[in-house]
Amino acid sequence: MPRITVREAISQALWEEMERDPNVFILGEEVGVWGGSYAVTKGFYDHFGPDRVKDTPISEAAIVGAAIGAALTGLRPVAELMTINFAFSAFEHIVNQAAKMHYMFAGQMKVPLVIRTVSGGGRQLAATHSQTPDVIFAHFPGLKVVAPGTAEDAKGLLKSAIRSEDPVLFIESATLYQSRGEVGEGENLVPIGISKIQRTGNDVTLITYSKMLETTLKAADSLAQEGIEAEVIDLRTLRPLDMGPVLESFKKTNRAVVVEEGWRSYGVGAEVAARIYEEAFDYVDAPIGRVAQKEVPLPYNRTLEQLALPQVEDVIKAVKEVL
Amino acid sequence: MAEIVTMPKLGFDMAEGTLVRWVINEGENVTKGAVLAEIETDKATVEVESTHEGVLLRHLVQQGTAVPVNDPIAVVGVAGEEVDVDTLVGQKSSAGQPEAAPPPAEPAKPAEAAPQKPAQEPTAAPQVEEAPVSGEPPIASPLARSMASELGIDMRSVRGTGPGGRITKKDIEAFQQKAPEITRVEPPSAAPTPALAPTQAFVRETRNVPLPKLRAAIGRRMAESMQQAPHFYVTHEYDVGRLMELRQEINALLDEDDRLSVNDFIVKAVALTLLEFPNLNASLDLKKASVVYHGEINVGVAVAVENGLLTVVNRNTDQKALRQISAELKITVKRAREGKVRPEDIEGSTFTVSNMGMYDVDQFTAIINPPEAAILAVGSAMQTPVVVEGEIKVGLRMKATLSVDHRVSDGTEGARFMQALAKYIEAPMRLLI
């Protein structure tokens, strides 16, 4: 199987879906002539033309609002927001309109919309452009929130998102675009809402997603050298959250650490740990550990930024604390 | 990276603990959960476990030092690691620097490194009755609990090796390996046992169970009292016929919940008698070679609890009505039995009454509850033949034995106390006026 980057995987998914379905189109800032802020849509404008690859004004509310309107008419828009930090400007449209229309109008309308955006820190973009507020969006019923951690899942999940009848927030990680992985040729759809075991082990269950999958797998390799075998589970989707593999693994290991890039308070770790306590209480042998970003606006200074973000060593330390 | 180990808070009212003994020496390896040191709180002696793994790089306090809760006591890190103790300690300790933390540049000056406090005088040791109530269920993970209940294992016999002594899956498995057979005893079958079946005798497991903390504390304190305080005993038999009649008469007027016990009468009688005997409402202060005559008469009542006993205290008993004493004792005794005792319930008694009257006890002797000077051991009220004006009649008698510390008082004083006590017990109307 060819090893391609996450960027190429996303690009392939978009390209293939646009080839397959003429209703699919892209809109966003600099997605057309420029080829996308992260070069995901390079060459799309020339191939698909300005009607299907639309550059927009610098207004996230306008981008998402227009995309919702298009989706209501039966098109399948893929809106790109340069970063998830800018999604706050379109928050009303995302959580109050896109997420609720199908429900509030008794199913008469559907909003088959994909919003692609980029989350995470680590590239010295300072506090307002480096956040990982994924859980804020995952809070809202009516919205699917997908955040792949591998090239294979990025491609397969994006294709499923485009074919979904519901609005999907598709969260990419800026520091993962260059990460390579094996991606099968042809149609490999990955269903939304299914967690995946990325590494097997019997000693501790590590639950994570997106960029932190890479960090967690490195930690697991390092722990293995000390004889600690961690099972690593990639959530892949924050809403709907698939706890099945997590609970199954936890019943085997009785110990868990949740690793996320965002802040700890009210985070993915809080949700996953609470569900384990609720659904597997009698299997709990130690408090569930949480690794997350330090609770400060992310510093610009490179050293401080790295200190504030969860690192491989933080995961190793947290695992040893629960063992 | 090196980590600081701090003085743990082992009870809700614990302010400091005395590091009695280092179990792990500097330079030795430590695993998580290993016992680092023994610490004496004003409740009991407990073991401090390491929350980190590595090498014990440095003791920050000497044996015998009293250390405030949360202050650093040791550094655990990697072998050969250079440690800047001041920086580390600065991170951890918000309240005051430990006096014993030596500057990192001068490691080899043990004599001057810290103003070593002398080991505590044994007599200044805490009171037994303040020991934590260990009837509480052990700390265990939910998994360990469900495993234990499935396997029929009594959690109290399992030693926890997790953080803070938590029993985890590992501990249950270890316990099972040690005692695989005892845990499941098949119920006897309904079929009649064949006669003379040459079966093997069922061998009950011999078990070595660590002493519960309260038990250990009581043992230490009682041994100390017996060894250091020369006890003498005075036994007196009281006519409790009138007391029993009076009690019956009063209780007939009271709701069931408010009824007075025999012990309530005795507690009040003791308090009034102590007014005349300040020497027995006293404590010996060995350090100052002096006797402390207490301004308050606070009668302690020994209460049996799971794994030991506690003494609940009734304050200013001499100034209280019988009914109030009774009501107060009901509350504190209940709290003690339920393991919810408060510090003020068990602190500050000046004389103790231990009553085993409910167990058909003729008489017994009690060990003085240090630093008190005396304790009264009360037996059961029993019907017995007595000679009244040359005739044998049925009387109601109760024996009590006073144990007195001979360093504070002498036999005649003990005897006079017992005699004076009769004034109240045999004419109990005095307790009401």
Image (spheres, rainbow, N blue to C red):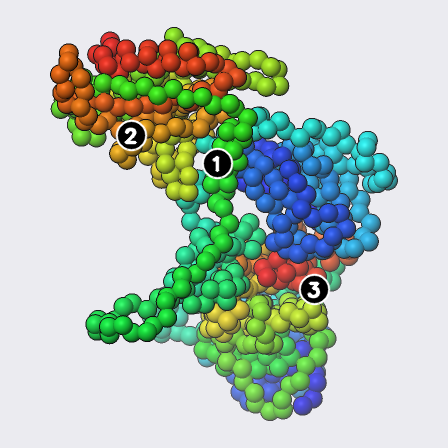
Q: CA distance from mark 3 to mark 1?
A: 49 Å
Q: Residues within 10 Å of mark 2 (few under 14, many from 20)?
A: some
Q: CA distance from mark 3 to mark 2?
A: 72 Å
Q: Nearer the viewer, mark 3 or mark 2?
A: 2
Q: Which mark is residue B362?
A: 2
Chain containing the residue with disc 1: B
- Asked if marks 3 and 2 fall on the same chain, the answer is no
Q: CA distance from mark 1 to mark 2?
A: 24 Å
Amino acid bearing label 3: Val
Q: How many marks?
A: 3
Which x, y percent locates residue B388?
16, 14
Q: Residues within 10 Å of mark 1 (few under 14, many from 20)?
A: many
Amino acid bearing label 2: Asp
Instruction: Tell me if label 1 and label 2 are in contact, CB under 8 Å.
Output: no
According to the picture, the residue beneath numbered tag 3 turns out to be: A312
Residue that sits furthest to the front in the current view: B390
Which x, y percent locates residue A199?
61, 76
User: Does B406 appear above or below B210?
Assistant: above
Residue A81 appears left or right of B313: right
The residue depicted at 64 percent of the width and 44 percent of the height is B37
Amino acid bearing label 1: Ile
Which x, y percent locates residue B423?
28, 11
Q: Is residue A90 visible?
A: no
Classify the position of the C terminus of chain B by image quarter: top left
Callout 2: SS? loop
Q: Is residue A255 visible?
A: yes
Q: Residues within 10 Å of mark 3 (few under 14, many from 20)?
A: some
According to the picture, the residue beneath numbered tag 1 turns out to be: B218
